Amino acid sequence: MPKQGQSVESCIIASIKKKGDSVKKGDIIFSYETDKASFEEESPVDGVVLECLYNEGDEVPVLTNVMAIGQPGEDVSALMAGSAAPAAAPAAEAPKAAEAPKAEAPAASAAPVAPAAPKAAPTGETFASPRARHLADKEALNLKDIAGSGPHGRIIERDVQAAVEARPKMTALAKEVARETGMQPTAGSGLAGTAKAADIKAVPNAVYGCDYEDKKLSNMRKIIAKSMHASLQNSAQLTHHLGADARRMMELRKKCKKAMEAGTLTANITLNDMVCYAVIKALKQYPNVNSHFLGESMRLFNKVHLGVAVDTDRGLMVPVVRNADDLSIVGLSNQLKTLAEACRKGGIDPDLLSPEAASFTVSNLGNYGVEIFTPVINLPQSAILGVNTIVPRPKDLGGGVYAFVPYIGLSLTYDHRALDGGEATRFLKQIAVEIENLQLDIF
Amino acid sequence: MPKSIYIDPKEVRKPGQIKIAPIPVMQYKKSIDDELKEGNFKKEDLVRIYRDMAFIREFETMLNLVKTTGGYNGVAYNNPGPAHLSAGQEAAAVGMAYMLDTDDFIFGSHRSHGEILAKGLRSIEILPDKELKKVMEEFWGGATLAVASKGFKGTTKELGIRFLIYGAIAEIFARTTGFNKGLGGSMHTFFTPFGIYPNNAIVGGSGSIAVGAALYKKVNRKKGIVVANLGDGAMARGPVLEGMTFASMDQFHTMWEGDMKGGLPVLFNIMDNQYAMGGQTRGETMGYGFAARLGAGFNPDAMHAERVDGYNPLAVIDAFRRKKALLEAKQGPCLLDVVTYRYSGHSPSDQSSYRTKEEIAAWEAEDCIIAYGKKLIAAGLAKQKDLDAIQTKVKDTIFEMYKLAIDEEISPRMDLVKDNELLGDMMFSNQSIDSLSTAKPDVNHPMEENPRVKSIAGKTRFYVDAEGKPVSKMKMYNIKDGIFEAIIDRFYKDASLVAYGEENREWGGAFAVYRGLTEALPPHRLFNSPIAEAAIIGTAIGYAMCGGRVIPEIMYCDFLGCCGDEIFNQLPKWQAMSGNILKMPVVVRVSVGSKYGAQHSQDWTSLCTHIPGLKVAFPVTPYDAKGLMNSALQGTDPVIFFESQRIYDKGEEFHEGGVPEGYYEIPFGEPDIKRQGKDVTFLTIGATLYRALQAADMLKERFGLEAEVIDARSMVPFNYEKVIESVKKTGRIIIAGDACARGSFLNDLAANITDLCFDYLDAAPVVLGSRNWITPCHELEEAFFPQPVWFLDAIHEKMMPLKDYVPTANLTAAQQIIRAKKGV
C-alpha cells in the first residue's frame, strides 16, 4: 500500500483483483482512497495474483503488502508473513516473520515481485540506531523503507549503507529533493548514472506530488544573475531606438558572398561584422561613449575594446575584441568568430570575459527576429548597443517616390549618469550614418 | 627472609618461659616542690600549664554550648558539623604537649581539640617571636592572621594564641580562614608549622599513619619524635595493632645498618578516657584490664609501656620526659596509657545512658583543672585571683575569636556553588618533582654495577628482533623490567624514596619485580614489612604526609580489602582535606592475581576508580609500565598502580623501536590506540588488551571487519577525546576488562561514551566484564574472564549480526534480566 503523503497512515481499498486473476503490467490491480482523494495502483509486472490479503472496504496501513503477483507455483509465504494482516500473522509465527526480512536484507532490492513490498520491521515500529538515523538523514533515505538487520530487527548503519548502495548515486540537489518529497530515484540520467533532481519523478497524481524542480544555479548563472541585477540596481539606464538604411550593408554582404565564392575573400563577412565595424568607426568619433563610468570619474579609452554578446549553452558570455579599431574588416570578422567559438567550446580566456575588459558592447539579436529590445549595460561600461532584425520600412526616396527600404534597428542603452540624451542620440545617429555609408577596405 | 638470621631448630625448640617486662601503673609520686627542686620547671611554666588547660576547657565549653544551646555568651550560632569534645581530658593533653618541640609531631583522633590546642600553645611558647611571626604571616598569605590580629595590640605570643584559637574555630566552622580552609573540620583540623599533624575521624586512623611519620623522620634523618594520640577504644582496631607491629619490627635493631640501627621514634599515647563511644573498654568491650598491657604483646620491652595519671599534668609530663629520652636513644616504640575521663558524651547527641550521674560527679569532684589550681595555690605559685584573672582572659579571647569566626564577612566559606570547580581543582596536587629530598641517596653501588641492570642491558627491548623473529622469553625485556627501570632510576634520584611490602627485599616481591634492588639499596630504603596491609599503606600515608616519596606494595589485589580504610578514607582524602597543605606522593603497587582462585585473582580497579582523590593506572605493556611508573614517581599524588600477574613477562609489541633506555614519562589519563581499525572499537582495561587483540584478529580473518583497539592505560584521570574520535569513526564500542561487570568502571566508561557519542552510535556500548561470581580455579577461568570469543558474541548479538556466526554466549535481554534478578 503506497504512502500517499506524509500524514497518511492507512487507506481504504475501493476495488481489488481477486486471487487467481491474471494481470498485465499496467493493469489496475487495486484502487484505494485516502480521506482526501482516490488512487489507482498499476501492476508493475505481468502475472497472476497469487495471494490477496484484503477485500474491498478493508483499511490497510500504508507500506504493508496488499497482494502478491507472480508466476503460478512461486512461494510467496515469506512476503505474506511479513505483512501486518492480522489474520495471516498469528502470534506464534511472529519470530519467523521477523527473521525473514533479516535474511533477505542484502538482496532486498532484487525481489522479483511486488517491488513496493514494505521492508519495515514487522512490529510496525521502526527502531534504528542513532548512527543509522544520522546517515539516513544525511542520505535523504526514509527509515521506513529500510529493513533492519541488527539485533531485534534494529536498523543499523550497514542497512542504511546498503540502501545507499542499492540506489543510484545522487547529486546533492537530488538528495535535497528526495528529503523534501520523501521519494527516491530509481535510475540516474547524469554522469555514470548519477541521479539528478529531475530523476526524482513526481508521482502520477500531482495533487500530493511535486510539479517543479529546484535546480541549483551553475556558477556562471550565479555570476550573470549578480552582474545583471547589479547593473539595473546601480545605474541610470535608458534606451533609444533608431533605424539605419541597410541597403548599402546588404549590397556589401552580397559582394562578399560573391568574392568568397570566387575565392578572392577568405573571411565570411557577416552583417554583424559590418555593424560592429561601423560601431567602431562611430566610437572613434564619440570618445565619451567609449568609456567606463566610475562614479567619481570617467575612464575614456584611446582604443576601442569591443565586447560582443555570445549566446552559449552555459549562458550569455561577452568576450572582448581588444584594440578592435586597429583591425581590418577581415581581421575583425575573424576575431569575432574565433571568440564566439571559444566561448561555445569553453576555452575562452577568462580575462577576455571581464566587463572591465571592454569599453563598449554590441549585442545582436537580429538573427532571432527581435525588432526592438533594451539591452542591459555591462557595468562599468557606459553604454551598449542592441542590434535588431532588418525590417522593410517605407522611405521617401525623393521626388515624391516612396519605397519599402530595409532598415536595421539599433537600440542604444546608455547610462544617463555618464551620457546625456543628446550625445547618446548623436552617437546612435552616427552609427546609422556609418552603416549607411559603409566602406569596406577589401573592395 | 634474610639469610643473615639463622633459625636454629635447637634454639627455637628450647623450653623456657616468656618473661614480660613489668608495666608500671600510677607510679608518679612527686609534688610541685619536688619538681621545682629537680629543676624540671620554672614557676611560670607551672602557671602556664593551668592557663593551657583553661583554654581547652573553655574552647570545648564554647562548642558544647553552640551545639546544645545554639550560641555562646548570648551570641547565636548554629554549627551543624560534628563536635567530639574532650572536657575532662585537659591535663592529659597539656601534659602530652609540654615536652614536645615543634619538630615533634602529634597525630590525633576525632577527639583532639584539646591536643591541638595544647601542642599549639606549647609551640607558641617555645618558638622565637620572629619565627612565630613568620609562620603566621606566611600562612594562607596572612589571611588567618589578618582576622586574628583585628584590633589587637599585644605581644607576638598573645597574638599567636589568638591565631591558634581563631584558626581552629574557623576550621571547625568551615571557614576559608581556618587551618585547612574549612575542608577538614572538627575531626581533622591540624597545623603543621606547630608540629600538629592530622587528626583522624576514623578510630585508630593515626595508629599506622603516625608510624609512617616516624619512619620518615628516621630514614630522612629528621629531628623529632612522633606521638600518636589514640583513644582506648582504638586499641581494638586492627590497623592500630598493625601499626604497633610495624613499629616494633626486629629488623630496626637486627638488620638496619649504621645510624639507621635502632627503633622508630614513635609513641603510642592512649588517651584512656574509659569509653569507646558508649562501650566501656575496661570491664565490657576489651579484656586487657589496663590498656598499657598491650605493650607486652609487641616486643620484649613491652613498648616501655606505662599507665599514668592523666588527671595530673605533671605525671603525664614526667612520663613524656622519660619516653622522649628513650625514643631519642632509638629505643622506640613507646606506649603510654594516660588515664583520664571524658565529661561529655561521645558527641552532643549522646545522652550518656550508659553511665550514672554519680560516676560523672565523682570524676568532676577530682577535676584536673580545679585540682591543679589548688596545688598551685598550695605551693604558693598563684593566688585564687590570679587564677580567676587567667580564666577571664581565656574566656575573653575565646569569645572574641568566636565572634570573628562566625562573621560571614570576615570569615567567609568557600562558595562551591558559584565556583563549581574550586574543590575539584584541590583533589590532586599534580606537581612534577624530581626529588623530594636534597640529601644524597643512600645506595650500595653505582647503578650500572647492579646485577639486574646489567642483565637487562643484555635484553632485547622489543618482542621481535631486527629480523622480525620472536625474541625468547629469557632475552626479552618485559613488563617487570619496565617497572624496575623506573623505580631504580627514582631510587638513585630521590633520597626520600623508600619501598616496602611483603617479601620486597631478598625475594624482590612475590613476582620478582624488585629482583636486584636488594643489592642496590640498604635495608632502610627497601625492606620486608609484616603481613599487615593496613600498616603498609597507613605508614606510607604518614611517610608521604611528612614529605617523602614511597612505594608500598600490595602483593595481591584482593588484599586491598585488608587496607580498606587506608585506601578509601586516608590516602585519597588528605590532599583536599588539608586545604592542599599536604601532598601525597604514594605509589601503591598492586598486583592483580591470576590462576589463584577466588581470593587471589580479583581485579579491584573499579573500587579504586570509585574513590575520589586516587589516580588509577593499569599499564599492560613494558613501554607503558615504565612511562607511567616514571610519571607516578615524578608526581605528588596518590596512585594505585595495578600490574597483572598474567602478563608480567610480556615484551613490548607496540612501541616502535622498543622500550627506550632513557627516562621518559607517559602522562596519566591518555588512552593509547594499540591497533587502528574502522568497524568497531575495543576499549580495554588491563591485560584484557591481549584478548581484545586476539578477538580483533578473529574478526579480521573471519568477517573482514577491522577493530580499533584502545588501551585505557589509566582510568583516573581519563581523557575521552581519543575514544570519542574512534567511536565517531566506528559507531560501535566494546569496553572490556577483568573486573566483575556489575558496578565496574567499565560501565562508567560506557555511560559516558553513550552520553558523549550518542548520535554516532550504531549500537549501545557493550560492556564485557567478568561474571558476577567468585573467580573459579584457573582451569575454569575461561567462563569467568572475558575471552576473545566474547567480543564476537557481543558484536553478533548486540551490534550487527555476523554472517553464519554461531554465538557461544547468551546475551539476550531476557537472560540479562534473569541474571540481575538472581543477583549474579
Image (cartoon, coloured by chain):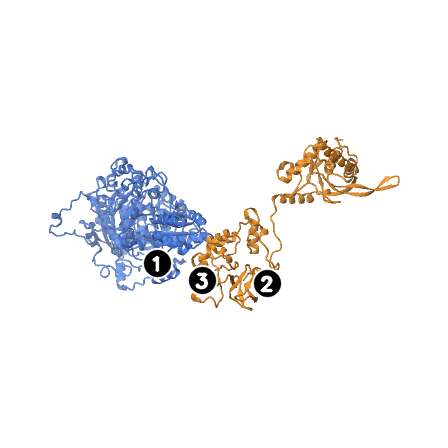
Disc 1 with disc 2 on a shared chain = no
Residue that numbered label 2 is attached to: A39
- On the image, the x and y values in percent for residue B660 come to 34, 38
Q: Residue at x 16, y 52 (%)?
A: B22
Residue A341 found in image quarter: top right
Q: Nearer the viewer, residue A417 or B762?
A: B762
Viewer-nearest of discs 1 and 3: 3
> What type is the residue that disc 2 sits on?
Phe
Residue that numbered label 1 is attached to: B64
Label placed on residue A97: 3
Residue that protrudes farthest toward the right in the picture: A399
Among the chains pictured, the one given blue colouring is B
Residue B773 found in image quarter: bottom left
Q: Chain letter for mark 2, please.
A: A
Q: Colour of chain A?
A: orange
Disc 1 with disc 3 on a shared chain = no
Q: Is A288 left, or right, of B617 in this rendering? A: right
From this view, report whether residue A299 is shown above or below residue A85: above
Q: Nearer the viewer, residue B293 or B533?
A: B533
Between discs 2 and 3, the one toward the N terminus = 2
Label 1's element?
helix
> What type is the residue that disc 1 sits on?
Asn
